[in-house]
Amino acid sequence: MNLVPLFVAVPLAAAFIIPLLGIWWKKSGEVLAPVCTAILAIMAIVQTGAPASVHHMGGWAPPVGIAMVSDGLSTLLLIAINIVAFVSIIFSLKYMRVYTGLTKYYALFMLMVAGMNGVVLSGDLFNIYVFLEIASIASYALVAFGVDAEELEAGFKYLILGSVASVMLLFAIGTVYAVTGSLNMADVAREISVRFGTTMNPALLLAGAMFLMGFGLKAALVPFHAWLPDAHPSAPAPISAMLSGVVIKSLGIYAICRVFFHVFGVASGAGGSIIFANAMIAFAVLSIVLGGLLAIGQWDYKRLLAYSSIGQVGYIMLGIGVGARVLATGGQLSVAALAILGGLFHLINHAAFKSLLFLSSGAVQHATGTRDMKQLGGLRESMPITSWTINLGTLSIAGVPPFSGFWSKLIIIIATIKAGHYAIAAVAMAFAFVTLAYYVKVQREVVFGSVTKLVEKAREVPALMYVPLIILAIVCVGFGLLYPVFGARILEPARDALMNGTEYIQLVLG
């Protein structure tokens, strides 16, 4: 049985069924959303190791019809999206009880999941845009779900800047269609290769710049990051976990990888490849530096995590950008493979530990009523399970061995050195210590330290809230200790799929 279309069909059906049943059955979302996300998570795990495949919607073969493409890169993102969605939904069952309109919340959540799954499976540019808009519109509403002034302002800012990104992407897609006469990504890649080779077409160079800015805004890369520091702290904790854990990855990083490697042919040295690769590296370094500097001065727990996301996305993009530049300049394939592997490894690591940290912050706020770290302290006594998960998450993201974040950052830095970018590697290494500094601050102010009045009254959160934290903490430890087990199964196929644009064309077009 072909599972690929079900990744979109199941959450999309749930998004429409939940509000309809909610008219008579108020608990429809609390039952159907966990069941559907559990099914999707199991399907994503089952999809691991499956051969690459193409599903022709309506039986129409590409480039005329719509294709849904599943390869190693898609599978990696499907695993991240659907597992994080499942644990976030379980966390929501207790956390969201203080809100009203929960039927709408669960419907919007499933709509966001359907959009993200659609983006990572779509084989043509226009449907990437359609699914991206579905996920984005749902996320705009979810950021503002509490309807307080702060939440509405953050949601409005996110909507405005997200709309700017959408316009840039639509113009980029229109430009590509005008030049190549096709929207299917494999067909566009073939047209660009045959008609232009390694020459630089000005219209395609403009389209590439708009793609990089549009997807860069969705990924919150500096200087397109302005929406993120307000949106992530204001959103409910499960939505913050989704935004930072998987939304910025699927709508931003994944889309950049797919478009520039498989459409514009960065890996094959097509026209403009070096320019695009250099831009990726520049945005990555800016994100690492600015994200780290802004995070270290924060006392709002969730805002610190939000700025941290900017810096960590910079590490992901650094690995991808260095790999792209090595390939574009005809460098060693082994160095490019190492850099891209490091970037993808950090992508899935960040999905795990940042989701864990945002859900943990939600648990802390739920128990104490604040996210001001100056008013927190000594949680290890009143909330031992949450405190342990916070410690494991901070050690992972700070890059302390043997946790997962250490290995992915180490791989990225080694690959950057091997590629000859010594100054950039030094910056990445220095800001790894900056990351460690502000997460030591989190541990000191939140978990350890003197017990405050608010913490004295705090009690451990219900099991439905701490079990997702335990699951994600186990993932953080497992990714660090068991890389040989899962690396060859999900990371290396994703790396190979990204580097082999020719195989992608052959897979889709036959």
Image (spheres, rainbow, N blue to C red):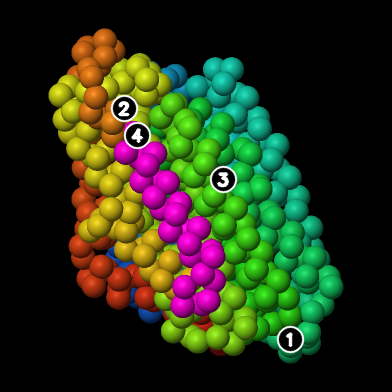
Q: CA distance from mark 2 to mark 3?
A: 23 Å
Indicate the position of residue 466 as horizontal and vertical percent values.
Answer: 23, 34
- Quarter placement of the N terminus: bottom left
Q: Residue at x 48, y 32 (%)?
A: 297
Q: CA distance from mark 1 to mark 4?
A: 49 Å
Return the residue at label 1. 198
- Counting residues from the start of the chain, the first of labels 3 and 4 encountered is 3
- Which residue is drawn at the image coordinates 36% and 65% (left, top)? 410
Q: Which mark is residue 441?
A: 4
Q: Is residue 374 above or below residue 343?
A: above
Mark 1 is on which residue type?
Answer: Thr
Contact flag, marks 4 and 2 (Cβ < 8 Å): yes
The image position of residue 242, as x and y in percent, is 44, 43
Q: CA distance from mark 1 to mark 2?
A: 54 Å
Task: Please rate how many residues cluster around mark 2, counting C-alpha atoms within 10 Å: few if below 14, some from 14 to 19, many from 20.
Answer: many
Label 3 packing within 10 angstroms: few (<14), some (14-19), many (20+): some
The label shown at residue 445 is 2
